Image: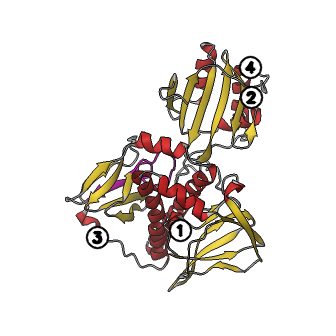
């Protein structure tokens, strides 16, 4: 895309149907690029004189690629005006496409991608693209096989990883499902069920030293895993800017800390520090701020809310990142939580636009890792909310 697109904006303010109308009314020729934090692949729509002639999104093309994009309730769009050199695969006019897509959306035939609230009063919610059933069941995006160097099979019930063991391998689940379990003093705490497209391992595995595994992973059925080329992934990781690396490591920390918090509530041992020291409000819940900051000194805390009141999620220290990450939604700040800090807190603003451009240059497998890690944080946070709410209501 050009550095300064002809038209750009936020899907939260301008929906795809409106964009079609604008481009059609101006008989525009060029390429529309759409992204959302709820799907790792962008959508591309090629327009000639105001009408779409071709589209791609991941492995999809033509109308099969366009229709799902109408379910992207949040994200960004950029239209670059210019000549289009591609064959016409789409015969319908732009207006026909919009009317058909909106009908499919109303009928539930197009899946809506967007944040799923951790609790709701009306029973209605926007369905997450990979969420089926309760929090904790995760199915990943389409698999990028280009980083798979070996395949391994595990039988139903076989343990794939042991809590406390060491290793730096990362697998992608090709077929089957696995359970992720944490052993506690109160018994086994099930963190998640991972299905095809999800990963076993994290970015810490790319730091050239073995990592301590924080949970058991067991095959729930016969499973086929793809071993990833961690040396190649490590080279990509080390080529990233320091700020982008900090964001990725923050995602790892978030998952570890939110899992610890959920395990604490599961065992009725809440060890989060007293939040009376966190008196300075840094970021409000529901804020539209797109700022992202890294902590230089001091501490901060992410605090959510549910029907029973405040719910501290996790504390953060030096080199922790907080705010709006443009390419992933963890279900934390600023959408569902606010951030408070200590009086001695010092931060540095990160260049969000530069981070977003860096993300867009990553290979699909690397983006998939980020996407699934964000989903894992989101779903584990949902488990924490459920456990905390049940515990609070049991006290009444």
Q: Residue at x 79, y 22 (%)?
A: 91
Residues under labels 3 and 2: Cα distance?
54 Å
Q: Residue at x 52, y 46 (%)?
A: 359
Work out which quarter of the rendered image holds the N terminus and state it.
Answer: top right
Give the residue at mark 3.
Answer: 274
Give the residue at mark 1.
Answer: 205
The numbered disc on residue 93 is 4
Q: 127 and 308: which one is in front?
A: 127
For disc 1, the neighbor class at 10 Å (few under 14, some 14 to 19, many from 20) is: some
Q: Is residue 90 left or right of residue 120?
A: right
Does 159 sit above or below residue 52? below
For disc 4, the neighbor class at 10 Å (few under 14, some 14 to 19, many from 20) is: few
Give the residue at mark 2.
Answer: 100
Q: Which residues are magenta?
A: 323-341
Q: Residue at x 68, y 58 (%)?
A: 197
Q: Secondary structure at mark 4?
A: loop
Tags 1 and 3 touching, CB below 8 Å: no
Count the marks: 4
């Amino acid at each position: 895309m050009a550095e300064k697109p002809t038209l750009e904006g936020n899907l939260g303010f301008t929906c795809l149907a409106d964009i079609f109308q604008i481009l059609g009314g101006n008989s525009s020729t060029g390429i529309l690029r759409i992204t959302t934090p709820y799907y790792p692949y962008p959508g591309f729509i090629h327009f000639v004189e105001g009408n779409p002639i071709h589209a791609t999104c991941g492995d999809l093309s033509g109308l099969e690629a366009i229709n799902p994009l109408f379910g992207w309730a949040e994200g960004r769009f950029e239209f670059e005006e210019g000549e289009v050199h591609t064959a016409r695969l789409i015969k319908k006019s732009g207006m026909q496409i919009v009317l058909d897509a909106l009908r499919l959306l109303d009928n539930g035939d197009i899946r809506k991608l967007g944040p799923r609230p951790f609790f709701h009063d009306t029973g209605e919610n926007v369905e997450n693209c990979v969420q089926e059933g309760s929090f904790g069941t995760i199915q990943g995006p389409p698999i990028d096989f280009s980083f798979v160097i070996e395949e391994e099979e595990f039988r139903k019930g076989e343990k794939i990883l042991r809590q406390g063991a060491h290793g730096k391998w990362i697998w992608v689940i090709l077929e089957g499902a696995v359970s992720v379990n944490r052993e506690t003093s109160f018994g086994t705490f099930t963190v998640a069920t991972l299905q095809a497209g999800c990963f076993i391992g994290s970015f810490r595995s790319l730091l050239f030293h073995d990592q301590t595994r924080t949970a058991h992973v067991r095959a729930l059925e016969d499973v086929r895993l793809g071993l990833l080329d961690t040396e190649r992934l490590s080279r990509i990781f080390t080529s990233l800017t320091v700020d982008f690396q900090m964001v990725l490591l923050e995602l790892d920390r978030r998952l570890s800390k939110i899992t610890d918090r959920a395990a604490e509530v599961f065992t009725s041992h809440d060890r989060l520090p007293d939040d009376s020291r966190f008196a300075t409000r840094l970021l409000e819940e529901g804020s539209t701020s797109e700022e992202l900051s890294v902590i230089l000194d001091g501490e901060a805390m992410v605090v959510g809310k549910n029907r029973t009141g405040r719910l501290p999620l996790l504390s953060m220290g030096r080199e922790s990142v907080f705010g709006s990450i443009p390419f992933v939604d963890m279900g934390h700040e600023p959408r569902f939580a606010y951030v408070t800090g200590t009086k001695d807190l010092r931060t540095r603003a990160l260049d969000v636009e530069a981070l977003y451009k860096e993300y867009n240059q990553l290979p699909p497998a690397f983006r998939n890792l980020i996407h699934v890690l964000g989903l894992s944080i989101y779903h584990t946070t949902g488990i924490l909310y459920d456990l905390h709410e049940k515990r609070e209501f049991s006290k009444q």
